[in-house]
Image (cartoon, rainbow, N blue to C red):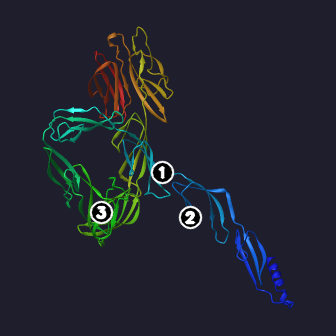
Amino acid sequence: MKKALLSLLLAIVCMPMAFGQSKAGAVFTTDTTVCGSYLWPVNNVTYERDTFLVYTQGDSNYVLNLTVRSLNYDTVNAREITGNCVASWNNKIWETAGEYLDTIHMTGQCDSIVKIQVTLNGPDTTWTTEAACDTFFFHNDTLTVSGDYIHLDTATTTTDCHAYGIHLTIVSSMLDTAAVVIRDTTGGCRITWLENTYSFSNVDDTIYGVGKTTMGNCDSLMAIHIVSFDSIQNDTTYVENCGTYRWSVHDVIITTDTADGKALGGIYSHTKISNGCTDNQYLNLTITSIHDTVLKQACESYVYSYISHEGIAGLNDRDTFYVSGIYDTNMYGDTLYSTHFNTRCRTYHTLKLTVDTVEILTRDYVVDTVACDKYEFMFSNLQRVITKSVDTTLVRHVTYGTYCYDSVARVIVTIKHKSVKNYNEIACDSYFWPFTGETYTSSTTKDVVLDSIKNAEGCDSIGRLVLTVNYTPEVSIVGNWHLNPDSTNVAVLKISDNPSDHNTYKWFKDNAATPFSTSDSVSVTVDRNTDIHLETTSHVNGHSCVANNWITITYTLGIDDVETLNVNLYPNPTSRYLNVETADGIKQIVIYNAIGQQVLRHDVDATSTQLDLGALSVGSYTLQIQSLNGEQATRKFIVNK
């Protein structure tokens, strides 16, 4: 549309020529697109919207074809930027918090005007608490008033600034006007008072000393009055210093520095005579050198580590050198410290370094092997342990005197592993495992390497014992088994403990093969001495353990022949150990085999004992026991291994 209007306007301007009229003036056209506004220099007018205008000046016609694009304003939704001491955004920096308008220049588009909300949090401040007398020096400032003070660390960046702050308390000194009179001194022309030394030259001098206030432990002035004094004063000062020392007595600088870092020094004297007073000053000085030389030799490179000014070695406190030469440590990080006579000195080291090149040895070797679980070998004087299959090359830098070389090894190791073989066992009371040579009396799981048994990969087997130990029931027979025919021929017997649901009972008479009862109590009719055998079986986890008890029912007229000794044996049968108990006490035990031979004799003197029957063969045995009061009893038991 605008192009059509422009063409029409040009046609109108040029019409006079077409109708033979006088010649028309020149036509100048401005066709432009701008952002925001446009100042047309022809008429010096600013336009802020699209404009199509013809302006005639003299014989000339000026045509303005203007397109105005709007600027993008967003002054409602402010962009928030933050910082410590300053904030930056869009290549601009703000040092004061507040709201600002900023222009965003965009290629091919009109600029955008945005509102900026600047928030400054201030520096990250480290605070300490201090107390001082009269004055306190804080970063080149002398402070005399209590308060909080902040010093900005200029070494930090503007965007990540740091400051140091103190909470300061100032206590003022005070003057004690009560003079202390010293009437007789032996200190020469100086006197030591209140842990300080004061000089004087005449009798009746008044000297102000330094004491402590009662508030804040600050110094206060106190007065002393000198009445008399000696004329000669001898003083010796002991000093340890680094490099040089300035002796203030007569303003002289003493230096004794060597390259080997040794502690040197000497004794110096100075005499001063004033107003009849002789003052002899002696200086006993020890000087620690602050320079030494370090000789080093390395292969390819050398890492020089040093201690920082805090006295702590860190990861960054090191430099790496690749070329031989002489290096001053002042140029490479901080200085080292050395200690002589408890004096800590900054020591400047000169590093004389020789860096040798590395030659690769042709004497390489190959490790190619198969191992079980792990493989250990020495490489370049270092112990190596491999726990998984590898195919790799090892390289180690080696220095031998002034010769540097690489030691190279090809390592091919195949690692195989042991296998586990389970031994599941159930036993009564105890179990002896031959692989460990140990006897176990409780359920357990044990592993042992069986080097005599190899698995399919040729490695040792691991024997794993999974043991369940059940226990033989501890029961005994109680009742009246000593019968008198004149009274009764029936013995009533039962087990000593309450019956258990896990136990079964079998009663046998005179070694019969078939039990005459399976109850926990019985009544037995006899006409003679009768042997009774009780077999108690516990049933736990599908496994049985058996306990055997024997008694003899005596059926005798004579009272002297009645056996009254109550004896308990267990476990019965037994594989090795037999426990014997009686409340009357045991004096002696004798054991006979089935053919009447004595196989064991044991003196006891106790109410119970445990017999080791490991040397006895499998079979039936008779145990004869004598009590401490002379009574005897006989019991039978079985060894069953």
Q: In this view, does 12 lie above or below 122?
A: below
**Residue at the image position 37 percent from the left and 22 percent from the top:** 568
User: In front here: 577 or 458?
Assistant: 458
> Measured from the top left, where is residue 40 in percent x and y?
71, 75
Q: In this view, does 281 lie above or below 548?
A: below
Which quadrant: the C terminus?
top left
Q: Is residue 592 left or right of residue 45?
A: left
Task: Return the residue at label 2.
Answer: 91
Closer to the eye: label 2 or 3: 2
User: In front here: 133 or 375?
Assistant: 133
Which type of secondary structure does the marked residue at label 1 adopt?
strand
Q: Hey, which residue is sitting farthest top in the picture?
A: 486
Which quadrant: the N terminus?
bottom right
Which type of secondary structure does the marked residue at label 3 adopt?
helix
**Residue at the image position 23 percent from the left and 49 percent from the top:** 342
Amino acid under label 1? Asp
Amino acid under label 2? Asn
Task: Return the residue at label 1.
Answer: 124
In this figure, what is the number of numbered marks? 3
What's the distance in space between the residues labelled 3 and 1, CA to CA?
Answer: 34 Å
User: In front here: 571 or 163?
Assistant: 163
> Measured from the top left, where is residue 599 in percent x and y?
27, 29
Instruction: Using a 10 Å C-alpha cutoff, classify the residue at mark 2 as few (fewer than 14 neighbours), some (14 to 19) or many (20 or more).
Output: few
Instruction: Using a 10 Å C-alpha cutoff, classify the residue at mark 3 as few (fewer than 14 neighbours), some (14 to 19) or many (20 or more).
Output: some
Q: Quadrant of residue 627?
A: top left
- Residue 329, numbered label: 3
Q: In this view, does 19 lie to the left or right of 116?
A: right
Q: Mark 2 and 1 residues: CB-CB less than 8 Å, in contact?
A: no
Q: In which quarter of the image is residue 153?
A: bottom left
What's the distance in space between the residues labelled 2 and 1, CA to CA?
Answer: 24 Å
